[in-house]
Amino acid sequence: MNATHCEPLLRVSGITKHYGTRLALADASFDLWPGEVLAVVGESGSGKTTLLNAIAARSLPDAGCVQFSTRERGLQDIFSMSQAQQRLLARTDWGFVHQNAVDGLRMDVSAGANVGERLMALGHRHYGRLRETAMDWLERVEIDPGRIDDTPRTFSGGMKQRLQIARNLVTQPRLIFMDEPTSGLDVSVQAKLLDLLRQLTRTMHLAAIIVTHDLAVARLLAHRMIVMQRGRIVESGLTDQVLDDPQHAYTQLLVSSVLQP
């Protein structure tokens, strides 16, 4: 059965996670649709990254189900997949952009090799085509293609993050996970990166889940957002609706703290 447009791209149901006696996630559930950008917001320790890692099969939850709409068979439980199937999914239809670009790049190989590596993992071997594709993607993320043979160690923080994005998007994924993608960058560099991300998600019809503590990032990039407090989703809705008319006391506190002079 082929995946259909009437089902979500991702269905998260009742994800719960403990670390010892501490409840890190409690019954998190939501659907994500093709081409939709969802922001997950909340203060440090609210469970945002724990949720992201569980959804991306980077950690196993204690309870709950995550289903992804595969191209061949529609919604499939990712935790029922073999490790090989999960790895293939992570290399093809998924991407993961780390907060620290060093965690998502190979620092001792060239920029071109970083971009081409995901393609090589899928069997691409023609050196000329790999190099051409890498140069094209460097240009798309606003890195001078002339830097293709330079290692990421020689790049600025913003360039490293853009290279990490190119590395993830080269296989044309349908879903990308982002963990605080603009954190630690200068304001002007953040603005350029956010413009790039907004452009890429729109032109590629790319679904994304973005963990951020920055409500301005959520407003700029996300169609919808969920607000987390102490491992629980306390509010969800259209981004502008949640930010302009927050219903939960915790969301009201978050929004008002941003508006403080």
Image (tube, rainbow, N blue to C red):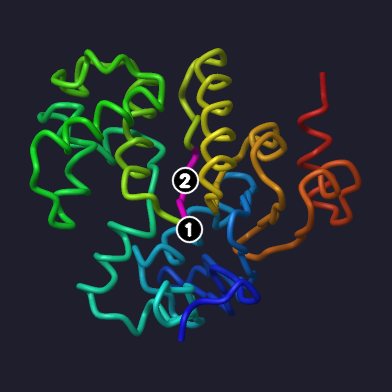
Q: Is residue 211 above or below residue 64?
A: above
Q: Is residue 235 above or below residue 21?
A: above
Q: Residues within 10 Å of mark 2 (few under 14, many from 20)?
A: many
Prevailing secondary structure class for the magenta stretch in the rendered image: strand
Tell me the residue at 28%/57% (across/down).
91
Question: In the figure, is residue 91 to the left or right of 128?
Answer: right
Q: Residues within 10 Å of mark 1 (few under 14, many from 20)?
A: many
Question: In the figure, is residue 82 to the left or right of 1?
Answer: left
Residue 6 % position (x, y)? 65, 76
Is residue 248 or residue 92 the one in the foreground?
A: 92
Residue 74 % position (x, y)? 48, 80
Mark 1 lies on a secondary structure that is helix
Q: Give the residues in magenta.
A: 175-180
- Quadrant location of residue 227? bottom right
Tell me the residue at 14%/27% (across/down).
110
Mark 2 lies on a secondary structure that is strand
- Quadrant location of residue 258? top right
Label of residue 52 in the image: 1
Residue 231 shown in magenta:
no
Q: Amino acid at mark 1?
A: Leu
- The residue singled out by tag 2 in the image is 178
Tell me the residue at 51%/45% (across/down).
204
Q: Amino acid at mark 2?
A: Met
Tell me the residue at 37%/73% (across/down).
60
- Quadrant location of residue 78? bottom left
Question: In the figure, is residue 80 to the left or right of 35?
Answer: left
**Distance between mark 1 and mark 2 Cα atoms:** 8 Å
Residue 188 % position (x, y)? 55, 13
- Whichever of callouts 1 and 2 sits on the residue coming sooner in the sequence is 1
Total labels drawn: 2
Is residue 209 or residue 127 the one in the foreground?
A: 127
Q: Nearer the viewer, mark 1 or mark 2?
A: 2
